[in-house]
Image (cartoon, rainbow, N blue to C red):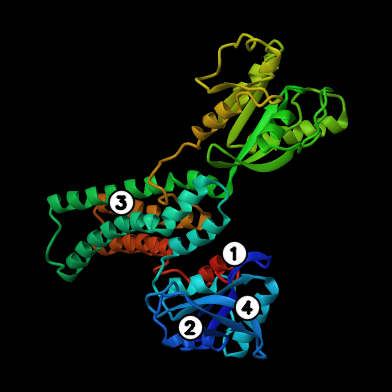
Amino acid sequence: MSDLIAAIATPALPSAIGILRLSGPGAARTAGAVFRPEHGRALEECEPHRLIYGTVYDREGRVIDRALATWSRGPASYTGEDTAEIQCHGSPTVLALGLEALLQAGARQAGPGEFTKRAFLNGRLDLTQAEAVADLIDADSPAAVHQAAGQLSGALGRRVGEIYDLLVDISAHFHAVLDYPDEDIDPFQARTLGDALERAEEGLNALLATYRRGRLIARGIPCAIVGRPNAGKSSLLNALLGYERAIVTDRPGTTRDTVEEKCTLGGLSLRLIDTAGLRETADEVERLGVDRSRAALEEAELVLVVWDASTPVAEEDVALLEQAAARACVILVWNKCDLSAAPATCPPLPRDLPVVEVSAKTGAGLAALEEAVSCCLPAGAGGAAGELLSNARQAEAARQALAGVGRAKLGLAAGITPDAVLLDLEEAMAALGELTGSSVREDVTARIFQRFCVGK
């Protein structure tokens, strides 16, 4: 990529600061056609990585702002090319006029994610780090921020790199065998190679086990609030959101459909789904709501089963709890504790489930519920922040690598020829290359960067 691109790098809304960004040959010189430093020297003559105060002009040479500018010389920049930024006041009109002036001065409008794409193509970021940029921008919970920031720092790339290096060592041995066909692999060498393949397989299995966790951190955890009619599910939803989102009345069966909203609880982003009360009913509309509630329960990763602490526990309460506990992480929520000195006698639970007493009306117990939620991150292999697979593309590449290692392991055990084992290893290495971007196809990278905003 040899042309000069420019874009507005901040949202098109009034704000304190707005940024015009350039990358490519002559970035500082072109920025200097729009921004003139107060001290009179040209921007490209100023020291890189320093903020310079000056004046911004439109395409007609009229003053539009007083601002700061900086530039960086490639490859020591975000994109690996010469870059420049003009930090204006955040007026959308000022920024639009400034961009027009930059385009007239020789830059072209950048496409979505083109700055980060250039950073990837110039080796400043691997593909997992580039994807982490978009994840960090979209992060809506502390857990999502920590995961994306860790991945941007290269944690996932390093974890994949360790497995890749192990496969490279094994592959190098087989290449040596092929170069010297008269030298057989003795039993000790075969056993050593088998152990190495076993370690690679274990590493890939552990990596794949992080996908469910990483995906839910990035996208938000679907959390169904279920229970009998009038247990206080909608009141609990409103209490967690902090505003009246769902209609609440004393009449059972008020909620006839699912109501979904996002909130951050226990450091996690939850997609809260308030459901219709689960009961048998002859009302056709309510029955449709109950059906949707059961579907939400089936799709949830976390379920808040709400029991009314002011009434005796019914058989359907226990049945619903058992149904939820059989397929998802469950928290039993005794609601309306303000109406009872103590919850009704609790029957034996299906397993050791977290139990929290709350009052959706007064807010009592919500802090304890938040703490319980923070302990309910979906099961799966852990790892340091940023080491989790966070999207389907990464997971599929890891699966292909695992399949290749598995075939190589079976082939080695069966005594097939080294060239056949090597072919499986190379397929596994190519899949890992797809994951980090070292051997990714152009159409894949184009699809990835389409989700980025312009200016990033």
Give whichever of 82, 286 is nearer the camera: 82
Q: Are marks 1 and 4 in contact (CB under 8 Å)?
A: no
Give x and y (percent) for residue 426.
33, 64
The CA span between labels 3 and 1 is 32 Å
Mark 4 or mark 3: whose residue is earlier in sequence? 4
Say whether residue 32 is left or right of residue 185: right
The CA span between labels 4 and 2 is 24 Å
Q: Are marks 3 and 2 in contact (CB under 8 Å)?
A: no
The residue sitting at 37% across, 78% down in the picture is 75
Q: Nearer the viewer, mark 3 or mark 2?
A: 2
Mark 1 or mark 4: whose residue is earlier in sequence? 4
Amino acid at circle 3? Ala
Residue identifier under label 4: 65
Mark 1 or mark 2: whose residue is earlier in sequence? 2
Give x and y (percent) for residue 283.
87, 27
Q: What is the quadrant of the C terminus in the image?
A: bottom right
Q: Nearer the viewer, mark 3 or mark 1?
A: 1
Q: Secondary structure at mark 1?
A: loop
The CA span between labels 1 and 4 is 32 Å
Say whether residue 193 is left or right of residue 308: left
Residue identifier under label 1: 451
Give whichever of 235, 221 is nearer the camera: 235
Say whether residue 156 is left or right of residue 260: left
The CA span between labels 4 and 3 is 57 Å
Residue identifier under label 2: 24
Q: Secondary structure at mark 4?
A: strand
Q: Nearer the viewer, mark 4 or mark 2?
A: 4
The CA span between labels 1 and 2 is 22 Å
